Image (tube, rainbow, N blue to C red):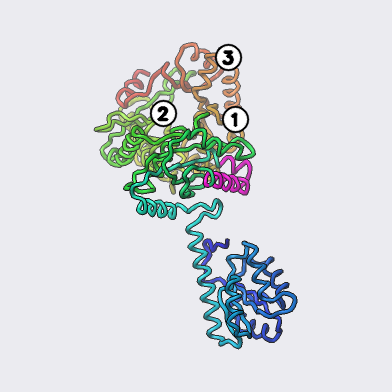
Amino acid sequence: MMHSGSIDLANVKRTILVVEDNEINREMLCAFLEDDFNILQAENGLVGLEQLEKNYEDLSLILLDVYMPECDGFEFLRRKRQDERYDAVPVIVTTASDSLDDEIKCLKLGANDFVVKPYNVEIMMNRINNTIHLRESASIVNQLTWDNVTDLYSTEFFYRHVEDMFRAFPKADFDMVCCDIEKFKSLNDRYGKAACDQLLCDLAERLTNRLPGFIAGGRMGSDTFSFLIEHQQLDWIHVLDSITEGLFATSVSIKYGIVAKVNHKLAVSLTCARGFIALEKIKGTIGTGVAWYNDELREQQLRQQMIVESMDVALKERQFEVYYQPKHGLAADATCGAEALARWTHPTLGFISPGEFIPLFERNGLVTKLDLFIYEEACREISRCRDLGLPIVPISVNASRLDFDVPNLAEQIAEIADRYEVDHSLIHIELTETIYSDGPETVARVLNDLRSRGFGIELDDFGSGYSSLSSLNILPIDVMKLDMSMIRQASELNDFRIVESTIMLAQSLGFKTVVEGVETSEEVRRLSEIGCDLIQGYYFSKPLKREDFEKYLMMG
């Protein structure tokens, strides 16, 4: 199948293959075509087939004589028809024979048009252009209709086909089966695009051929599919496990979300979204491959929609409140910093956990608005503490990966700090290594810009499961923050060697260290002995409202 992609077809010079044994006729034909087309020539059908084999992906048309030595036009058409690679290349037969039988025979063998010599040049040119236009239009429609990797419907045409089925069978019960390949990007990085395209193709083929009651399938995204089937009462876990067993060279985790007895009145896109909402509940789990959309998930979806839609009003009405969790300096035995944390009390939903609203805002691209709000609140608090004569300590703000795609992020943060006359060194940006790994070049560029403006950079959650020592040399880090899981494990095992080694590594690179999640006096003692700079955790203080944080600072 040939695809035009993003090429501007109006400005492309097409290629035509002229297969004609009479040299004079061939030269004359090429002469009036060469201004508008790239021309390939063949003096008989055998040479023409060789040219077709070499150039079929670039050919827009074949002009074919019928009566030639060695391989005539009829035999050329027969052989062309046997190879599906050549299906997209149209053929106009040009011959001195005006036999009706010859014309019928050529058309039956797959010719698109039949022209008797001598031909009118203007008429011939119009036939050529019309044939090419029809072929390219069909190719574009085909490209829009079908996904070229899996041969499933494209998203839009899948929706249309499902809508047609609903109209044709208004009383029938259908199910929607949605699937997602977990960690597909990692598979791509490890095995390459060609191998992963084959994985997609094999999975689509298996589901198309083996899903009970299969009606239609569509590719929804890079690694996600949806399938409409007749409603089934089956052991879906067994069925789907058997379909994907031994699918790839290594273990591949595929999650399925099923919407049973689809509501015909609901937009197909929303039905598919519900299937993917169901499978999201089991992503990352082991041994659970299938989830069903139900009333509980529907209520959760409505709640999430309400949370997202409330965000702008919540910012405007200052429903969000920033809490500050102190960071205690061991050497100074005093508060030497704080982390700004967002809290939200909704007027009707009540308190909403950051663990609920932040992932939603990240998925919907709204998190940057919230982060900029927190930067401003942090600057406002530093300014307020200065006016009250309280100790001034650096405040860190957690960054989202989406923040680094904001144009002029460093300028915006600098403008906020300057507006409140806050020294840039008092604002720290906290990021995780996961954020860096999702876009290393962009993240590093923005961090270097922030660092050049005097802002502090903190690497958060070090040791939480994804830690690359190479990133320590690349990122412009001022502070390494050890994840609370490290201190929990060290306390449980009564073995602080890993924590000590990590702190020594950080200090050798010139970083200050913070350990979060500290809860006991024994942990404080051990961390003090091994040279940790700052401690954050409930042993000293939980996150505090602004007023309580200021009282805490006042106490030293």
- Give the label on residue 339, or none: 2
Residue 431 image position (x, y, % from top left): 48, 35
Q: Are marks 2 and 1 in contact (CB under 8 Å)?
A: no
Identify the residue at image location x=50%, y=41%: 180
Of residues 163 and 475, the one drawn nearer to the viewer in this rendering: 163
Percent across and percent down for residue 103 are: 59, 79
Q: Is residue 96 visible?
A: yes
Residue at 50% from the left image edge and 71% from the top image edge: 134
SS label for mark 3: loop
Give the quadrant of residue 32. bottom right
Image quadrant containing the C terminus? top left
Q: CA distance from mark 2 to mark 3?
A: 28 Å
Asked if the stretch drawn in magenta spans residue 262, the answer is no
What span is colored magenta in the figure? 185-208
Identify the residue under disc 3: 495
Q: Element type at marker 2? A: strand
Callout 2, which amino acid? Glu
Q: Position of residue 234 (x, y in %)?
A: 46, 35
The residue under label 1 is 509
Query: Nearer the viewer's eye, disc 2 or disc 3?
Result: 3
